[in-house]
Image (cartoon, rainbow, N blue to C red):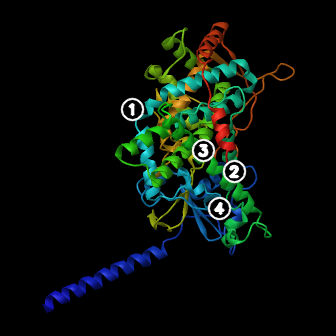
Amino acid sequence: MVLVSLIQTLIAICTTFLIYKHLIRKSRLPLPPGPRGLPLLGNLLDLPRGQTPEFKHWLSMKDKYGPIGSVTVLGQHIILLHGREAVQNILESQSLKTSGRPQTEFGSYLCGYGRMMAMHEYDASFRKTRKLFHQQMGTKATAARYDGSSEREAGRLLAKILRNPPELMKHLGSHMATTVLKLTYDYSARQTAPDPLVELLHSVDGSFEASMIPLAWMVDILPLLRYLPEGFPFCDFQRTARLARHQLEKATEEPYLFVKQQMSRGNYNPSFVSRNIENVTQRGDLDAEDEHDIKWSAFGMCQAGTDTVLSALRSFIIAMIMFPDVQRKAQDEIARVVGPGRLPTFEDRDDLPYMQALVKEVHRWGPVVPMSVMHKADGDIEYNGYLIPRGSIIVANSWWLLHDPEVYPDPSAFDPDRYLEREEPDPTAAAFGFGRRACPGRLIAESAIFITAAQILAVFDVGKALDGEGREIEVELEQTAGLLGRPKPFAYRIAARSEKHAELVRQMEARYEGDKDDAVVMEGMLSAE
């Protein structure tokens, strides 16, 4: 008995010693390298300023400190990843520890954007919402159920372009909003005038981006301000947040109620929301928690899908202007496979390898999210002799990962052949996020870009605009600062490839002339508040 007690004591002492050694070692591990900060402020002055895109600003960190670096701002550690190995080891292999999202007082809590899937904490509600996505669009088979609606909306886009070519960018914006609303809610947006639900979504998108600018809101620096009333000095943010929250809740609630109304009348086609409601009711009653998860996952699909795919399509247009040989090669493939009498469909996809490679190159050449959405470390992480403390914000420079010349030779060139002839790495993994926070709607987004780009190239030529003296206007891809790297405005020219191609678009448009929209129903719902 004494021997047993002695052994237990020795085991306890050894265990305590090992834990102590581990803690001492961990406490001595340095942060990843970075610039020296100021007292209290830390590296506040090292943050991006002005209109310089974040990915460009942080490239200097890569050049000076290597594939992993850090800055500390007001006590908050920010870890910057510029190496594929670092991303793989930290965001992929240790995704259980790095799947959190940093929450902000203004955007996450006061405005309510923390409830959106893209910004939600990694908890049970997030995992359930992600499961809804996977069930409805997580495989090629389930995602293919939405192909018909995507083709139809792409056809409507062609008709708008043919009628008014100079408004191409505006047409692309409304096209993505109407496509996502159709897939999510089976909502048919108004085509010939502004649609109330499309305008509401655009309003929320603008408020969301403004709310998430780091340190732009005083309450994010002094959180106690959130408890002061709206009219108090320095509390103008309270009114801004109240209005943003109201718009967000309308955009989440009203289209969901629209689907339930249509389902109760038996007057609906399958959509993301209706399929999820049917799945739940087949197992039992639809409770408040189910409704919360479905409506917020649906809004997350709209919010994430509209602006991201739109930015990708704008990059596609710029690429076609800058690299006309690529445009011609894609058009030749479409003509050879599809023929002159119809538009390309998803059934042609497997027979259009160059077009598929072109879509991949759009993701690499003009990544929609050049700096990944922020991750949060939910536990201490050791990597290559460095400590990433619990609570650290972790950001990967996706733009660099996709433009590293050692991985993608001649990275500034738009070259789909790099995936066909040279088998360079598929860029979609870095373009759509990492670990357990990778975009769950990736397959739908890729399909929307493919069918839209293929149908545009089938019937239109895209080229350089001419100035007042008839000279071509050069363009290049310049992206804005912010979460989304939107291409800055650029000049372009788009025209039907021939009268036969224009007639093909008119014939397609004639098939949709009798379609009714749901705008009047939505206007009634929104005005009934």
Q: Residue furthest right?
A: 469
**Circle 2 residue:** 207
Residue 289 coordinates in the image, percent (x, y): 46, 55
Crowd tier of the residue under label 1, counting other residues whose Cα lies within 10 Å: few below 14, some 14–19, many 20 or above: few
What residue appears at the point 34 percent right and 78 percent down from the top-left corner? 18
**Circle 1 residue:** 141
Which residue type carries mark 3? Glu
Q: Residue furthest left?
A: 1
Q: Are marks 2 and 4 in contact (CB under 8 Å)?
A: no
What residue appears at the point 77 percent right and 23 percent down from the top-left corner? 465
The one of 185 and 406 positioned closer to us in this rendering: 185
> How far apart are labels 3 and 1 at the CA level?
29 Å
Which residue type carries mark 1? Ala
**Circle 3 residue:** 254
The image quadrant that residue 135 belongs to is top left
> How far apart are labels 4 and 1 at the CA level?
39 Å
